[in-house]
Image (cartoon, coloured by chain):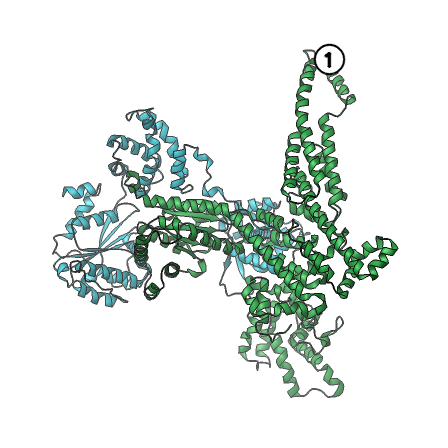
Amino acid sequence: MPHLENMVLCRESQVATLQSLFGERHHFSFPSIFIYGHTASGKTYVTQTLLKTLELPHVFVNCVECFTLRLLLEQILNRLSHLSSSEDGYCTEITCDTFNDFVRLFKQVTKAESLKDQTVYIVLDKAEYLRDMEANLLPGFLRLQELTDRNVTVIFLSEIVWEKFRPNTGCFEPFVLYFPDYSIGNLQKILSHDHPPEYSADFYAAYINILLGVFYTVCRDLKELRHLAVLNFPKYCEPVVKGEASERDTRKLWRNIEPHLKKAMQTVYLREISSSQWEKLQNDDTDPGQLKGLSAYTHVELPYYSKFILIAAYLASYNPARTDKRFFLKHHGKIKKTNFLKKHEKTSNHLLGPKPFPLDRLLAILYSIVDSRVAPTANIFSQITSLVTLQLLALVGHDDQLDGPKYKCTVSLDFIRAIARTVNFDIIKYLYDFL
Amino acid sequence: MDLRKPHAMSVLGCFVFKPNLKKRKISVPIEDYFSARNNESEDSKLRFETYQLMWQQMKSETERLQEELNKNLFDNLIEFLQKSHSGFQKNSRNWGFQIKLREIPTAALVLGVNVTDHELIFRSLTEALQNNVTPHVVSLQAKDCPDIKHFLQKLVSQLMNCCVDVKSKEEESVQVTQKKTHCSMDLLSNWYKTVTQKTEPKIPSKKRTTSSQWHSPPVVLILKDMESFTTKVLQDFILMSSQHLHEFPLILIFGIATSPIIIHRLLPHAVSSLLCIELFQSLSCKEHLTSVLDKLLLTTHFPFKVNEKVLQVLTNIFLYHDFSIQNFIKGLQLSLLEHFYSQPLSVLCCNLPEAKRRINFLSANQCENIRRLPSFRRYVEKQASEKQVALLTNERFLKEETQSLLENLHVYHVNYFLALKCLHNFTSSLPKYPLGRQIRELYCTCLEKNIWDSEEYASALQLLRMLAKDELMTILQKCSSVFKSSSEKQLGSTAKKIEEFLAQFQSLDADAKEEEDSSGSQPKGLQKTDLYHLQKSLLEMKELRRTSKKQTKFEVLREKVVNFIDSLVRDYLSPPETQPLHEVVYFSAAHTLREHLNAAPRIALHTALNNPYYYLKNEALKSEEGCIPNIAPDICIAYKLHLECSRLINLVDWSEAFATVVTAAEKVDADSTPSEEMNEIIQYPFISSTMVPEHTELPANALWEETQDGSSSSVPATHMGEPDLNSWLPASAWPSFSCCGF
């Protein structure tokens, strides 16, 4: 079938396997097929094109959208009944709450003339979401053919291997098909395939070659690469449009585009700068360095006491409680770190992550690090709560615990150092790890 | 406080934080409160009306300001939305467009940590979007959307409701029945299709000209608190809606309080690559505060002023605690209310002509109030003796004098703010900001004392004497624009003088050029010599310079300018306490304000337990230090007894002591030992009062174990859950305490 080969590139063996599995229209096919592979390895596309071009009766459902059992089952049934009754336009909303009902209704729906004597395909995209739903769902779909006694095949599409799915009981092993990642050659071929009509295929292929040279090390996602290719193509064509270079002048074109692509890798690819902003920059021909990315805005303006509360929380999270005396009492005497340490404390606290601390310890540290006297007013307490809602602190344990709540400080060392600098507080001097 | 009145408590409780006019009108008592303490003769009604009028004016002024400040942000945002949506609409057959990823246009709106202010911004944003971009604007909060199901449910119900407003009501019933059953993206896209089809035939119908230009307006979804949303909900929703983008044109707005990095922290790359994120930042809240102060306090538009302490309290709460403009304005409202409530003479705190009119109708009582004002007494003492007598005895003369004094006060303020702004222009650019960077700091110092006596002022002047010419000129230009912008014609000569200075500086330029030409030949003196000669000639030159230390023209002029600003300050920036009748317009009860706005729950609790009279106002409870009255509430007695012991209390001793105190009065008349029955009656209140363990910081946990196996096991276990004792408010609810004493 030459038509199909034109539409599906570099997936010949998988297409052949699937086609042989499907067999003739009226043949019973394998009850369930599990297809997995990385993001953008053509799972959905291949399945969809295959079913469409072969004009097989099928239902395509994305499991992300169907977050409840009911939604999933109803969607399948409704689409099926739509398929079967498309000629006379007769269609009612089917309601279905359980898998049991589903099996019953499925039998009814597939009784229709148009669906008789041929395999019906149900494709469940993003099948990993099924694992979070009811336990009987996955085994049920796996042996749907057996349960309904109809000619039906369920195809699962997922990015996760089958081993992570396998339910404990009642499992029917599906046919597992792996879609390997595209090689660089494959990518080159596929990307060059959709060249713009104004330019020759060779010209675009040369561009794709350069693009892959830059991006292949960081990104093999076909969709993303395609997107990037389209975004940056105008820049590549620029010398040609201006008449400074011919289409064959690869070296000149390369010199023009390469730094541009590298910049794109640091900005657009990470979504630091949005695609539309990037296009605008290209059109205006300004230096992309001027536009600050999202990560450049790390600074958070906080009220004065909030800063100190955050600092106190950080200290409480990363210092062992026993050392508080040494840091916050005036006449603590000298404690040598080596003698003082317990065995498990020898590893850096920063490697272990923040530890929970009670509210009272936070307040005690707060009072000792703020120069002026702080009254324990309602405002101080509400600031702690609002720091929690801002996700700078995290409440440990349940919300209901009112007395002696425990918190963790979730900010990074760099962040807290920046905060401490604004209030002239040398936080490093107070951190046990940096003693 | 009359608690029997319906809603009396609720009105009090929410008054400071949620001024709701309708509610106030229904339960009239507020007005009565004004007259409750002071008798009718002191114009309580008039004062209340003045308060209301002025608050309305202030409120509308702040709202206008808010709108103005947000305008820029909103305009940018609307432009972004329109642009990104029209990108959709073009639906160009263009090659790139078909291959490119369909990204959801997303505006990351960084609003700052003052979460309390966000609600207002979102409200006006929604309004602006509905007027300019699309009727379909939905905003969601994280707490309503714990999972994707609720998320979609909220989204669907809000969308359908907001479109019902626009369309006829008939469809409502049809849609409502549909909605509860299942909310999926299919439903949404179907709904969208029907809505757009319906609007299409009647394009030139309504006033929504801009939005109906597009055949299909986008759906804008505002996520108010991005930080609190869970990763899963956001991720699923974005995955879902990006699949349906072509039939359901969605635009997202993320409300971010901290920093935009949160987007990357919440969303994995696979998801964030589906978004086309652009960043929008709102004005910093400190700048916002400056403009609010400028519009409300640093102006003669509103006669009401606050003194240095009150301003300190308000700005400290803002800067140290919450960064919330809303709370700041609420605080200001509270001061306004408190001023009109507690100061009988505040009836004169209105615009000048009205105040003059009101003076004529002042009662004898009020005249007496005027005479009692400390500032007025000081003023009287300075007058000649005949005038003194006249002021103290003749009511009509007093009224005339008061009128002129009020007028003086008004003029003083006009001059004061002009001079203050001038001084601020001079000092705000100095290195290290000796007098503060913001005008509010300067204002605080000026309110507090004679600023020219302070060291900082001296050092600021010192620094001013070192300014370069262009700096000085820009400052002078700013000053002259300050004078130009003010409508008042006071200080006209000063404005003229500044203009003169500017002209002189400009003429200096011309002079300097000539001078340069003449002195151009001078520094030729250094020629190639040996070291000795070089040193010698350098020394000579130094000597020469010292002897000819004649000031240049510029230096002379600079000195003049500095002296000029100094005299301006000395003439006009004297603190308001020096002005007679300043009490009429200045609110000074900082401690009341602090009590209300910055409440300390632990301290209040201690006071209540230690000194119940403070809150209950029952004369019988009045007692001297250290003595425990037996009629005090049981819990107070228990608390006081526990205070007497240091760390650990023996439960039996405590119970004994409690019994002794409670029965102290009875013992006097019936000198018998309390019976068994009596004992149990006493035990019960004692045990129930020891049930408040954690918050009074009693060492109760240890005690309880003792009680459980002890004799007093008769206490019902349900007692533990007694609502008034154990259901402590969460920390976030504490601020609402602050108005209880109101």
Type of amino acid under label 1: His
Q: Is residue B526 visible?
A: yes
Q: Quadrant of residue B193?
A: bottom left
| Above or below B174: residue A153 | above
Report the residue marked by disc 1: B533
How packed mark 1 is, by other alpha carbons closer than 10 Å (few <14, some 14-19, many 20 or more), is: few
Which of B311 and B367 lies nearest the eye of the viewer?
A: B367
Chain appearing in cyan on the rendered image: A
Q: Which chain is green?
A: B
Indicate the quadrant containing the C terminus of chain A: top left, top right, bottom left or bottom right. Answer: top right
Residue B728 appears in the figure: no
Is B204 on the left-hand or right-hand side of A180?
right
Question: Whole-percent x and y of residue B395?
Answer: 80, 61
Q: Residue at x 30, y 39 (%)?
A: B96
Which of B202/B87 is in front? B202
B269 lies left or right of B256: left
Give the percent coordinates (x, y) of residue B345: 72, 61
| Chain for disc number 1 | B
In this picture, is A103 found above or below B267? below
